[in-house]
Amino acid sequence: MASPKAAVVGAGVIGLSTALCITETCPSCSVTVLSDQFSPNTTSDVAAGMLIPHTYPDTPIHRQKQWFKETFTYLFAISNSAEASEAGIHLVSGWQVFKSTPKEELPFWSDIVLGFRPMSEAELQKFPQHRFGQAFTTLKCDCPPYLLWLEKKLKATGTQMYTRKVSELWELHSEYDIVVNCTGMGAHQLVGDKQLSPVRGQVLKVHAPWVKQFIRDGDGLTYIYPGIHKVTLGGTREKGSWSLSPDAGTTRDIFDRCCSLEPSLQGAQDIEVKVGLRPSRQCVRVQREVLSQGGIKLPVVHNYGHGAGGFSVHRGTANEAAHMVGECISALQGSSSRAKL
Amino acid sequence: MRVAIIGAGVIGLSSALCIHEQFHSLVPSLELEVYADRFTPHTTSDGAAGLWQPYLSDHGNLQETLWNKETFDYLLGHLHSAAAKEMGLYLISGYNLFTEQAPDPSWKNIVLGFRHLTPKELELFPGYSYGWFNTALMLECRSYLPWLTNRLTQRGVKFFHKKVESFQELFSQGVDVVLNCSGMRAGDLQPDPELQPGRGQIIKVLAPWVKHFIITHNLKSGIYNSPYVIPGREFTVLGGIYQHGNWSEENSAKDHKTIWDSCCQLLPSLQKAKIVQEWSGLRPARPSVRLERESIRLGNLQGEVIHNYGHGGFGITIHWGCALAAARLFGNILQEKKQQATPPGSRL
């Protein structure tokens, strides 16, 4: 197997970063990205891209921490380089505030973000309805810039990208040696994963360039994340809702909740409303599988189900998936050399 | 009672507002007039980035530290008001960087969340081994000065585009009290060898991904002679020039290169920033702010002057505390005039 051919299905942050990791760890592999949507029409484009992890109940914490750490380290280096603005990566500081003191005062990621500490009394005065808070500095990946930058890096490695709707992974078996499934919410249909369900999120993207800091309510429902050009105001977490249409009442509610955290947002302009479905799962599925039909085998690497935490762990899971692809290639080469005996 | 304010920078306009707010109902005849040859956006204040931050050391000048605090608290109180956006006021966090350990500043408990930088944070800034992180305020004068002007205009304060040549000129027209907020040009009205220009030059760029201020310090070369990056609402200000005694308001190519190279080294992402404007200005530097009364007598002309100038590179930082102090001095003047008007014994 001179040049194994890998197809990565999905072109959101997971698909593109996984494809890139494959080109880095398996240079002999030729990679093609197939997706029915590319930026700016992916779920990732709706997300704010803040590096604040979501906790997956069934993934071991040390694994989540490792994924986050790898992602943070990778993006930290880019943020401090000349490529930062093109890649859409920047540092942002701010506060996570709680109406009542959380059970867990030190989240697992507190030593990975920068300068994590409890808020002082003076700082909490800005949030009269909240009695506890954490201040820290983290990174933000703005989309579309980050996805476009990943696409540019992929093209430079010779990776091809095609708009194509894949109806079942098996349909790729004759053209590709390995398939990498980064279809996010699409995996529900594509591989029939009933453990995967949407958590609908509606956000507003507004022009409010004086907002330089993030504010997040610890309940996860209200947040203000300043991006390069626009501030993302959120949000909702509607379990099981598949609707991609913006809801006007929800827009009003999000705006009001954010203004009560940051009154100056009353002056925000150019309000755009977006909706995304977080591809949610009890644990992220980063896993190998072998599909077989009529004696033909198709190795598959799954990398989906990142829910609300896609950006926070994307590079870590992409690396893990890329290593699995490497293992698949070795297995294929092993079996093909056995076939030659 | 006619009060003339000389100067329409942040000091002149805020002092005028403070006095009008406090005294217009007590003194029905109060008339305020602002005289200046430069108005926003052409004042020294307009060139400042607008970051609230005093110098590293107050040199024992506790009064100035108090005025700084009064200003911070006043602005913080306005942060959630409907006026904040129009004032150009917002919160901002950022870094102060050093190549060696430095004592904590006098303002550490005035700002929010002051702390020392962690080793990981210092990795962001090779060449710097020590530093602070805190949350402070931005007050952009290109918004604040028009806001002050609107408030004053609403209150009936009159504006005159005119260079005042002497205090006597105003007293001879019937002005009772002069507020001297003439900043760098105070020496034209009354020689003051302690007032010297602290020339600065800045480059304004488009770099909206920069969300923190970054101020570096070189304890040997002195304040603001080391690169700094301050993100405004629309533009980011790059600077790092402080030339004591240099009166030139022309942009220097050499200073441009110094600023650009040092800021890009500090923050590599700036290499892709688009340059929008260049500006030079003179910080009205003085060993301490001149904030005091003076009675001026020339022949049969007499008047009171309240001096309020020499705020160096911290005018925005200290402005409201000084305005309050100037208003107190004005109150003293009013009190004395009242006592003079009703001499003891005349009530019999």
Image (spheres, coloured by chain):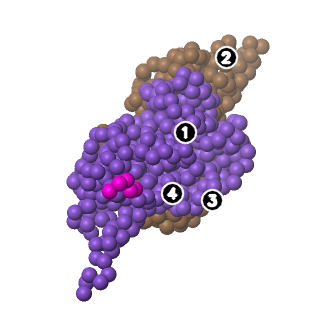
Chain colours: A brown, B purple
Residue A259 included in the magenta stretch of the image: no
* Marks 3/4 same chain: yes
- The kind of secondary structure element at disc 1 is strand
Distance of label 3 from label 4 (alpha carbons): 14 Å
Q: CA distance from mark 2 to mark 4?
A: 63 Å
Residue A175 tag number: none
Q: Residue at x 37, y 59 (%)?
A: B304
Which label's residue is closer to the chain start, 1 or 4?
4
* Residues indicated by labels 1 and 2 sit on the same polypeptide chain: no
Residue lying furthest front in this view? B299
Other-residue count near label 1 (Cα within 10 Å), few / some / many at <14 / 14–19 / ≥20: many
Residue B198 numbered mark, or none: 1
| Residue B1 can be seen in this image | yes
Task: Residue B68: give its label.
Answer: 4
The residue type indicated by label 1 comes to Gly
Side of A117 relative to B45 (left or right): right
Find the distance from the CA under tag 3 to the CA under tag 1.
21 Å
* Viewer-proximal residue among B326 and B75: B326
Task: Answer with the quarter of the image where residue A80 lies.
Answer: top right
Report in which chain the residue with disc 3 lies. Answer: B
Q: Nearer the viewer, residue A190 or B72?
A: B72
Kindly indicate whether the residue at mark 1 contacts the one at mark 3 (C-beta within 8 angstroms).
no
Q: CA distance from mark 1 to mark 4?
A: 20 Å
Q: Is residue B170 above or below residue A340?
A: below
Query: How many angstroms separate mark 3 from mark 2 (CA)?
Result: 68 Å
Q: Which residue is mark 3?
A: B60
Q: Which type of secondary structure does the marked residue at label 4 adopt?
A: helix
Left or right of residue B4, residue B115 in this image: right
Q: Residue at x 51, y 33 (%)?
A: B247
Q: Which mark is residue A28?
A: 2
Which residues are drawn in magenta? Answer: B296-300
